[in-house]
Image: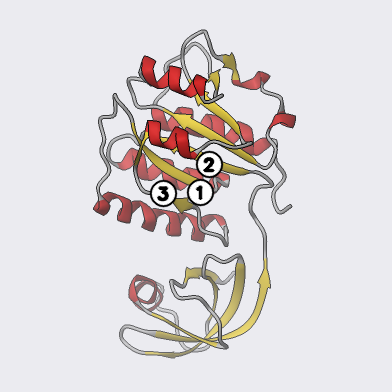
Amino acid sequence: MARRFFSSASIQSPRIEISGSEAHHILHVLRLEVGDRVNLFDGTGVEYQARIDAISRQKVDCVIEDQQTVNRELGVEIHLGVALPKGDRSRWLIEKAVELGVHRVVPLECERSVVHMRSASISRLSKAVIEASKQCGRNQLMELGAPVSFFQWLEEAQGDALRLMAHPEEAGCPLHTIDACQTGETVKIAIGPEGGFSEAEVRAAVAHDWQLVTLGPRTLRVETAALAVVASISSWSRTGQ
């Protein structure tokens, strides 16, 4: 099976030049040679079958032999607003969100947040999106939004979407009782930091017609709660619609 590689430049001609980390992986890790075949994608939903035509120390020239649009996206757009956890847990969460088909992740700055994202952190997470897409076969890149305050995100997240806020208190309804028919085309999910959403944040969400959902009697980590909700929603939706 041909290896998958990402082209940061849009593929619009019969030839494509691969450079940077992808070229390094082809040349110095896998040690592929002229004549070997690779699969390429540029995040637009198209898969390209290509043959290596020429190589240098830092670049790989490929000839496109075939292409096809392959839709592996969910039938519903999942927008995940989450107060990202510390360190490698953020990267792990992003990788799994890609695998589960999340359309967009927005890092939330909440009143009890312990992590405040910097541009370098966002850059590392963007690379994680690409690597996870290569691994799981997605041809469209999951969007990674800029960090935003929770209250601002509430204002931006209005519309016809089903809006779910994970909340450990008894006031929330069990996630499994949410009717799959409610999902429509877009679902927006809010996951708070380790200390949970503040009372002010919960009141604001309810005022904006968010539905409080609980995931059971146990206290879950941020990444566990996020992926539990995402997995439940994605199971309601067919891929490739």
User: Could you tell me residue 194's position as x and y percent?
Assistant: 33, 24
Say which residue label 2 marks: 79
| Of the image marks 1 and 2, the number of the one nearer the N terminus | 2
Asked which quadrant contains residue 57, the reply is bottom left
Give the CA separation, mark 3 to mark 2. 10 Å
Specify whether 85 is left or right of 186: left
Query: Where on the picture, by quarter, is residue 109?
Result: top left
Q: Which residue is mark 1?
A: 98
Residue type at mark 3 is: Gly
Residue 97 on image: x %, y %: 49, 43
Which one is in front in this view, the residue at disc 3 or the one at disc 1? 3
Q: Mark 3 sits on what residue?
A: 145
* Secondary structure under the numbered disc 2 in the rendered image: strand
Residue 232 position (above or below residue 75): above
Give the mark nearest the N terminus, 3 or 1. 1
Disc 3 and disc 1 in contact, CB within 8 angstroms:
no
Estimate the spatial distance between the alpha carbons at disc 3 and disc 1, rounded to whole Å: 14 Å
Kind of residue sitting beneath label 2 = His
Q: Residue at x 63, y 39 (%)?
A: 234
Tag 2 or tag 3, which sits nearer the N-term?
2
Label 3's element? loop
> How busy is the neighbourhood of tag 3: few (under 14 within 10 Å), some, or many (20 plus)?
some
Q: Nearer the viewer, mark 1 or mark 2?
A: 2
Question: Label 1 amino acid?
Answer: Val
- At x 44%, y 22%, the residue is 204
Residue 61 image position (x, y, % from top left): 45, 87
Percent across and percent down for residue 19 are: 37, 79
